[in-house]
Amino acid sequence: LAPSLPLQEDFVYHWKAITHYYIETSDDKAPVTDTNIPSHLEQMLDILVQEENERESGETGPCMEYLLHHKILETLYTLGKADCPPGMKQQVLVFYTKLLGRIRQPLLPHINVHRPVQKLIRLCGEVLATPTENEEIQFLCIVCAKLKQDPYLVNFFLENKLKSWASKGAPNVISEDTLKGQDSLSNDTGQSQQPEKLSGAAGAEHTESEDGPPHQTDDLSTSLDDLSATSLPEASVVRPNQDYNLVNSLLNLTRSPDGRIAVKACEGLMLLVSLPEPAAVKCLTQGTSLCELLTDRLASLYKALPQSVDPLDIETVEAINWGLDSYSHKEDASAFPGKRALISFLSWFDYCDQLIKEAQKTAAVALARAVHERFFIGVMEPQLMQTSEMGILTSTALLHRIVRQVTSDVLLQEMVVFILGEQREPETLAEISRHPLRHRLIEHCDHISDEISIMTLRMFEHLLQKPNEHILYNLVLRNLEERNYTEYKPLCPEDKDVVENGLVAGAVDLEEDPLFTDISPDNTLSKKEWLSSSPPPTPDHPKNDGKTEVHKIVNSFLCLVPDEAKSSYHVEGTGYDTYLRDAHRQFRDYCAICLRWEWPGSPKALEKCNLEAAFFEGHFLKVLFDRMGRILDQPYDVNLQVTSVLSRLSLFPHPHTHEYLLDPYVNLASGCRSLFSVIVRVVGDLMVRIQRIQDFTPKLLLVRKRLLGLEPEGPVIDHITLLEGVIVLEEFCKELAAIAFVKYHASSTP
């Protein structure tokens, strides 16, 4: 057996075998797979890997030196671009991908690597659904992975420093047609002396004559690139500017009809947006159409949805993950019209959300602003502001869905500003509609259509659970800042002991209130019972000074609904325990969200408050209180939703919302109402109306049992709306009592 050749000779042998093919062959129509080129390229790769493995790390061996010095990648790029023989582009992409993937030493900093890599990037995504799409995306993804490892390398791929090649005066520009022309392959006489320099297809490389400076090769092959390529059908994709071609090529491939390729392209973009290099971020947001792609696709997918989709379908369509948008209508038992379109829209929204979450900070803000301006305002707002009830319902259900779905803080902030506006000063009745969308959505909470009311209230309920300080501030807190809902009475000496006994000066004790003369001692809970059913303590929460004793507050809420209007003690399992457990869990969640907002532990001192300012509870609470006041006259589902939003608000660990919503003993200034005073009014109305209904208590009990599913549906009961309203009222008071107790318990536990 002949001794094995040293690696370099072997390497050069394989390369020359490839170059000889171009000199000797006359048939350039035969596909590359019929030649030995693929196997020679594979051997060259194996040799480079073997050479690296045999050397110290970081040391460049003679084969790699040869590859770099003889600009083999440039030559391969030119052959790939001309796709000569047919299928060569695919081979070149595979070679580049494997070279970058299998060689450990950093190659991209070398000009003879990153320059041809850059040019090859431009060939990717030019034509959609081309046979080389798979190889193109593999190649682009390996480049992205390398940049993720060494972000500074991205500077080699920002082409805003493009030199104007033409002005260099490169010798006679070769047109793309001569590259295609078969005859030019064999008529170059200088070829035999330097076989590694090609003619014809690689004619550009051959201009490195003795008198020309060596870098002219590259200038020329670039001028060749920049000529209008006649060889390929023009791509249906635009390259607005050539500053960041890696992004442009990936953007084009996200439109691929092959879902797997589109997903890989999306993953590549996700790697690029997270790179910390400032120049790359600027180029990404200003020099590419990434922002436009995200928002235009969101807009077109939103517009492709049917005019009306059942809100329940929008809500229940399973959690969407952008990479798994592979929906098959045939396999789906729960299909509905528009489901395919809905899943596509929600999964693209999820992609935008994740992309912004991963992105470098400046890039994230730019992308989220684009979504705000071009999609929220441009597309969603007109839909939400329309007057067609079907349209309002569908667009509000979609808004509710994306409010629930958004996880990126930066995108959430833009969404909050879109829905609520940026105002932070107290509201006045005159300026209630300063932010038209906010005004319209709050009005929809009290819409003539119950469905619209419920959907909009649910949207606000989910919005209030989002980790963004501006939401509660804009809707509620800004109006409670000065505590001007209270009337300030300076303490006189004889009031001192009253305060020490747990009552605020001047507060009315409920037991002396004419409305509550019928309170029996059995239906109030003693302090001991409350404490025995109390949940474990929550993490420390500063104690509020001057807090009214909790059992008084708790019993105030529990005694609000008079005995004859109560029905829960006749039915098993409707006690307070579940409310206490829920309140404890929810309060803990809210504390975790609000921790970073550094809210005060106690209310602003009254001496420092501007109590003279006219008090307006704000549009949001006004609508909620108005609806709460009509609890005996509106449908059960609406009542559940209104009380649900109010209990959410009362869970927030802010001293002002706590005082305004949960303290029955607060001294209300004249003309002001609080949650407690609204309920007191409803109860007054109820007492009068009970007198007029025959067999009130048995009917009430029957309705409760039907609602709980303990009794079969039977004949319609008269006054059903009122009876259901009373049940919701009783449960709501129990819930508020539990919340007040849990909050007190949390703040008094060290």
Image: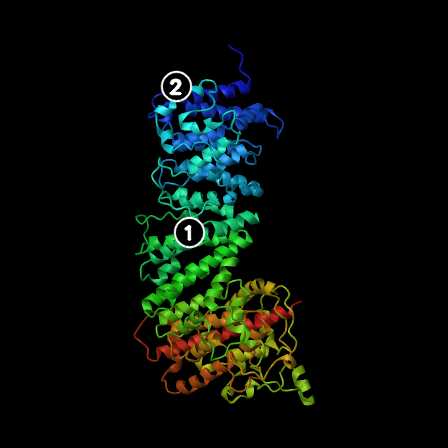
Question: x%, y% of residue 124?
Answer: 42, 39
Density class for disc 1 (Cα within 10 Å; few <14, some 14-19, many ≥20) is some
Mark 2 secondary-structure assignment: helix
Density class for disc 2 (Cα within 10 Å; few <14, some 14-19, many ≥20) is few
Residue at 35% from the left image edge and 28% from the top image edge = 181
Tell me if 574 is positioned left or right of 481 in this view: left
The one nearer the camera, 327 or 97, is 97
Tell me if 80 is positioned left or right of 471 in this view: left
What is the C-alpha distance between the residues marked 2 and 1?
A: 47 Å
Mark 1 secondary-structure assignment: helix
Tell me if 593 is positioned left or right of 457 in this view: right
Tell me if 34 is positioned left or right of 435 in this view: left
Residue 667 in sight here: yes
Question: x%, y% of residue 120?
Answer: 45, 36
Quadrant (top left/top right/bottom left/bottom right) for the C terminus: bottom right
Residue at 61% from the left image edge and 30% from the top image edge = 58
Question: x%, y% of residue 119?
Answer: 46, 37
User: Which comes before the other along the chain, label 2 or label 1?
Assistant: 2
Question: x%, y% of residue 614?
Answer: 54, 83
| Residue type at numbered disc 2 | Glu
**Residue 88: assigned label:** none
For the residues carrying marks 2 and 1, which lies nearer the camera in this image?
2
Q: Residue furthest right?
A: 493
Q: Which residue is mark 1?
A: 293
| Residue type at numbered disc 1 | Leu
Residue 49 in sight here: no
Picture quarter containing residue 543? bottom right
User: Residue 330, relative to residue 622: is it above or below?
Assistant: above
Q: Which residue is mark 2?
A: 24
